[in-house]
């Protein structure tokens, strides 16, 4: 393929992906429910805090947006994000909802742009052959046009924002910009299930500067709730009560529900309860650190995200926007290997395959197939990375 063809092909892919995001993520073709449904709850939390109310109290949450018809009914809604989310929620809550929902949309679009920027930098840094430009186009198109991104944008969810911050924490840490890495990790902590294992990794690496800056960032973001609830004890007690009252009681947060992902949910769909499975995520993170010299450094973040989605829990199908590093690693390893590339494309196709087809076909027991696919993707990245690292070591010995 000529460079001109690659450029035109990449532009075509990008155009189709942008059109897909607009149609399914913003206009809402084929969508049920209103635009920014989850964002409306976060907006209500911001309004509640601004009015000096307890955002974790359901009555106060709904009271904060009483009379704002566009938010819809929040009778079945609940808010259980940690207190540092106040900074983001209040940012939107300062404005009328007609403006606030587009602020939320803008934050999601900026997050997509940041993820693309870091991904392309990674591709260009680690692939210097003629395929690198095409790889950047392909990854950008996947990030924009995949169904999970559209789902997050349509719902007004926070997965893209939290993942962009988590990815930025890793991105800056690898460039030894530890203050920026800590700030990004602190921001990402408003959705801890996406950044927890990365925080543990920094702890194992004894990167105290990142962790200290992250803690300071969390404290600053939580400043208003700290004052409102009368200190850290009252603030954390309010959050804990909100989780007890809301999170576990909602059907879509129960393991086994079709939107919940990970091994815990997969087992629960078969009636098996394994309460200690979340500990596996921490154990695997420690093992990854112990054997870190057997894989390429650039694959660590991808593997950590894969472990999070497979074993840590507390994630839903739309959170799969955090899998982009795995897809990036696979492209870097497979772009010049036809058989490996075809196998990877098959797995990615299965990852993006519409769930509604299984449901329509009367095959509900297959709705958790993505957990198996993600596990296979992680194993694939590990295998490629270990092989590449071993090959590098052999070449150095020969030299």
Image (spheres, rainbow, N blue to C red):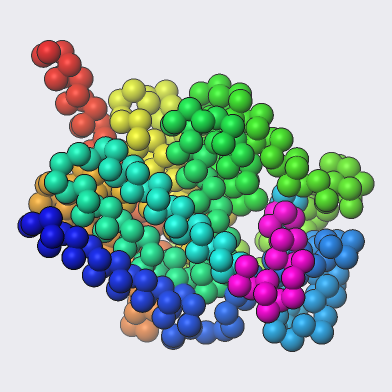
Q: Quadrant of the N terminus?
A: bottom left
Examine the rendering and report whether any part of residue 182 can be seen: yes
Q: Quadrant of the C terminus?
A: top left
Residue situated in front as seen by the camera: 154 or 286? 154
Left or right: 75 in relation to 214: right
Left or right: 360 in relation to 200: left
Residue 93 % position (x, y): 75, 67
Instruction: State the residue lying farthest toward the right.
Output: 230
Instruction: State the residue lying farthest toward the front.
Output: 4
Left or right: 309 in relation to 221: left
Left or right: 19 in relation to 11: right
Report the magenta stretch's main SS: helix
The residue sitting at 15% across, 13% down in the picture is 397
Q: Is residue 89 magenta-colored?
A: yes
Residue 3 % position (x, y): 12, 55
Q: Is residue 262 magenta-colored?
A: no
The residue sitting at 37% across, 26% down in the picture is 292
The residue sitting at 67% across, 74% down in the picture is 99
Q: Is residue 70 above or below residue 253?
A: below
Residue 207 % position (x, y): 56, 24
Residue 63 % position (x, y): 85, 75
Instruction: State the residue lying farthest toward the left.
Output: 1
Q: Is residue 15 above or below residue 169?
A: below
Q: Is residue 65 above or below residue 374?
A: below
The residue sitting at 59% across, 83% down in the picture is 34
Residue situated in front as seen by the camera: 156 or 2? 2
Asked which quadrant contains residue 396, the reply is: top left
Q: Give the residues in magenta.
A: 85-103
Asked which quadrant contains residue 178, the reply is: top right
Examine the rendering and report whether any part of residue 263 can be seen: no
How many discs mark residues in the rendered view? 0
Residue situated in front as seen by the camera: 381 or 183? 183
């Amino acid at each position: 393929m000529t460079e001109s063809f690659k450029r035109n092909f990449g532009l075509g892919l990008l155009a189709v992906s942008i059109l897909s995001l607009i149609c399914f993520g913003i206009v809402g073709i084929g969508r049920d429910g209103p635009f920014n449904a989850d964002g409306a709850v976060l907006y209500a939390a911001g309004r509640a805090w601004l009015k000096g109310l307890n955002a974790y109290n359901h009555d106060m949450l709904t009271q904060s947006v009483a009379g704002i018809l566009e938010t819809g009914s929040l009778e079945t809604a609940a808010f259980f994000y940690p207190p540092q989310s106040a900074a983001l929620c209040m940012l939107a809550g300062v404005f009328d909802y007609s403006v606030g929902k587009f602020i939320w949309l803008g934050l999601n679009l900026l997050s997509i742009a940041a993820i693309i920027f870091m991904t392309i930098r990674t591709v260009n840094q680690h692939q210097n052959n003629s395929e690198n430009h095409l790889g950047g186009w392909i990854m950008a198109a996947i990030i924009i046009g995949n169904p999970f991104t559209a789902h997050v944008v349509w719902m007004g969810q926070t997965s893209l924002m939290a993942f962009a911050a988590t990815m930025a924490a890793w991105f800056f840490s690898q460039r030894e910009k530890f203050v920026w890495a800590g700030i990004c990790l602190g921001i990402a902590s408003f959705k801890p299930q996406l950044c927890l294992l990365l925080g543990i990794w920094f702890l194992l690496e004894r990167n105290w500067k990142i962790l200290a800056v992250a803690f300071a960032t969390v404290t600053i973001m939580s400043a208003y709730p700290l004052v409102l609830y009368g200190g850290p004890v009252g603030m954390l007690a309010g959050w804990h009560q909100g989780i007890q009252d809301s999170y576990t009681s909602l059907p879509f947060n129960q393991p086994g529900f079709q939107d919940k992902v990970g091994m815990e949910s997969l087992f629960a769909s078969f009636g098996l309860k394994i309460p200690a499975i979340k500990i596996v995520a921490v154990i695997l993170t420690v093992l990854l650190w112990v054997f870190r010299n057997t894989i390429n450094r650039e694959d660590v973040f991808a593997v950590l995200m894969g472990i999070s989605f497979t074993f840590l829990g507390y994630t839903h199908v739309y959170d799969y926007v955090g899998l982009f590093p795995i897809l990036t690693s696979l492209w870097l390893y497979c772009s010049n290997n036809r058989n490996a590339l075809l196998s990877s494309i098959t797995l990615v196709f299965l990852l993006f395959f519409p769930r509604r087809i299984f449901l329509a076909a009367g095959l509900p027991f297959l709705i958790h197939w993505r957990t198996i696919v993600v596990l296979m993707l992680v194993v694939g990245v590990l295998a490629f990375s270990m092989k590449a690292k071993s090959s590098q070591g052999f070449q150095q010995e020969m030299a």
